[in-house]
Image (cartoon, coloured by chain):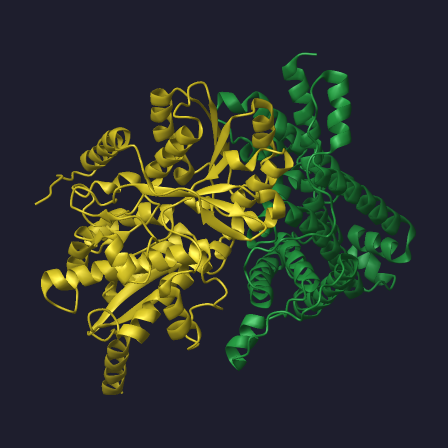
Chain colours: A green, B yellow
Amino acid sequence: MPDQLLFAMEVMLNGLMAGVLYALVALGFVLIFKASGIFNYSQGVMALFAALTLVGIQNGQVPFSHLINAIFGTEVHHFGWHVPAIFAILLTAAIMVLFAWIVERYVLRHLVNQPDIILFMATIGLAYFMEGFGDLMWGSEIKKLDVGLPQGINVPIDETTYGWFGYGFFIDNLDISATILAVILVVALTVFSQYSKQGRALRAVADDHQAALSVGISLRFIWVLVWSIAGFVALVAGIVWGSKSGVQFSLSLIALKALPVLMLGGFTSIPGAIIGGLIIGVGEKLFEFTIGPLVGGATENWFAYVLALLFLVFRPQGLFGEKIIERV
Amino acid sequence: MRTKLATLALGTAIAATPALAELTFTSLSYRTGPYAANGIPFADGYADYFTLLNERDGGIGGEMVELIECETGYNTEKGVECYESTKGSGALVYQPLSTGITYQLIPKTTSDGIPMHSMGYGRTSAKNGAVFDYIFNYPANYWDGASVAVRYLLDENGGSLEGKKIALVYHNSAYGKEPIRTLEELSEKHGYELSLLPVDHPGQEQKSQWLQIRRDRPDHVLMWGWGVMNQVAIQEAVNIRYPMENFIGIWWSGSENDVLPAGDGADGYKALTFHNVGSDYPLFDDIQQYVLDAGLAAGAGDQVGTALYNRGLYAAMLAAEAAKTAQEMHGTSTLTPGQMRDGMENLEMTEAKMTDLGLPNFGPEFSVSCENHGGDGYAAVAQWDAAAGEWGLITDYMQSDQDVLNPLIMEDSMAYAEENGIEPSCS
């Protein structure tokens, strides 16, 4: 098999894996938009905050230690214990639920019936607040995140493909883990929304707020629920991306990677987020591989948006988004 | 009522004006945002050194130092706002800590007559002081870095790079593109094959670049990165099992922040530096006594001795030494920005002076002149020891290839002079 074809296959596989990582971020946006019509600008910061909290709990870091030390002249930084990853994840998930409740109680509740743009602006404020709060709580140094996810080249795939083609494919173990996590997440979300009472209520709210309210579904509960789930998805995204680069404040910028995925897949479809992520991932990687060298490289960021825009020309609602028809 | 308002306004104006008998320095820092992890140690080192001078020596030449810090968030627009809002404070020199901000401030500081020091960043050709009379970039610039990296690789390869493949992984920005011209010129001279791998901001996803490195197997990889790009690149290099000892970053890709997330895998990674590492110097004992123990540290005190803290401290030390030089030249303890410029232009750093300051063998010897605002282009190579969790210098300071760089600097600076109607002069 020609070398270039082998390389293209390797690039495509890695593009699929990268697409899963993008989809993980996009899922959080979709959940909140689907249930409340809010484009949650703070989704990237939620992933950052969740990852910061997870590492902080794992390492036994004293929250707000800089503030405490500055006010009281103390020198406290760590509790001196190390929390196992699984408990730290559960505790962080609980904190994200608490965060969801706070958002509903102190932000969303006061903005019911306000135009979408007001809610969007509120999430911008929320993003900046959380970024500052996270800094104050956990500090801004870069932290190593290790919850036991394997990283580095997958040796069996490398050796198998070498045996077949005389060239070993590189697939990152972390990407494989992310794919497995994404599959579990999507299946769990689908089962939850299709077969649980709360899930059906969530879908009812997504379809029609007024009708859902008229049959006794609590909008406030649904909002807490959906922000909690989005918080959990943000935690998963934070774990995967934080394992790649360490937990640091630029983690919030992963939201930039989700936008073309949302444009392509649609803002209201969970399968759309996954398929959109895969198309963007493969598309940008193959474009970089084939056309990139001709135009000086670094095409991935802009090409993802060009690809999304191309799809928008033909399907403005995205591949799987709901077609909205407003009649006068 | 009108009298009361006038009195209030006068009082406010007096309160806002710094005491005249002070030397005012500014720190355009970034303690928030995506690059805060790098901005904080630099800003801490910069501030702690001036605090030390105030507490131990009563300032510089008998004048207390006032440090004005302004948060830029590593954002160019905010950096310019910081400059505009602080330039009236009597600031003697600006250290913007951002190539983007530096580029924006070059015409402004020149027009306002306030010197700017872009230490190891900014516009490389500002080394030509005949054109950039208020801009300084000593002791080394990006082109020096590229050249020293190649010189080191020559040493590593028995004096020849003929037929070798070198890849440059760089931030796709003005900063990241700085070394390309130099590396291209040097590739013609030394016969290596250069491949360019740009990474888009912020650099969280670099799979394409590292798959290409895995396919092409370059003998050496150089990196011009910043922020998250560095951590991801080092992790990806670990993932594809690229030999770390063949991977060299510029000094902005060589802090503890860059290597710690990759854990043991980062062991052996190398980075250029124009100052030494660690805290095993007499000066740091004074920092401990007069700054940390006195509760006067700018930060939490946990960054002392890190690569970026040391760089901030070194920058402040060079600013203070330039101020001392200016005081001696003009026979006055109080300084104007113009006098500070003179001090910077006549700065001479010798090993004896560094030893007196409590920093023996901390930085290269260099001198500044009107024709040369960039020092003598010396840099060393440091290597990361993951087990010990520290950097260590593995070479002496090496000089860049002045024969190649000087014509490039002259060409670029003269083009700038022509574009901006500047008559180069060293009177």
Instruction: Specify the quadrant that holds the N terminus of chain A.
Output: top right
Image quadrant where residue B360 sits: bottom left
In the image, A65: left or right of B288?
Answer: right
Q: Is residue A115 left or right of residue B106?
A: right
Instruction: Determine the image quadrant of residue A75.
Output: bottom right
Compared with residue A25, is residue B3 higher up or lower down, i.e. above or below? below
Report whether B410 appears left or right of A16: left
Camera-side residue: A113 or A138? A138
Q: Nearer the viewer, residue A233 or B356?
A: B356
Task: Please give the name of the residue rendered at 67% of the width and 16% of the height, measured from the top-left corner.
Answer: A5
Number of numbered discs overlaid on the protein picture: 0
Q: Which image quarter: residue B283?
A: bottom left
> In front: A253, or B351?
B351
Residue B377, position in %: x, y?
29, 41
Q: Is residue B71 among the parts visible in the rendering?
A: no
Q: Which of the two residues, A8 or A33, is positioned nearer the viewer here? A: A8
Quarter containing the C terminus of chain A: top right
Q: Residue furthest left?
A: B427
Residue B376 seen anywhere in this rendered image of the structure: yes
Q: Position of residue A170 (x, y in %)?
A: 68, 29
Q: Is residue B329 left or right of residue B352?
A: left
In the image, is residue A220 above or below residue B259?
below
* Residue that appears at 56% across and 39% down: B233
Q: Position of residue B324 (x, y in %)?
A: 19, 63
**Up/down of B66 relative to A195, above or below:** below
In percent of width and height, residue A183 lies at 81, 41
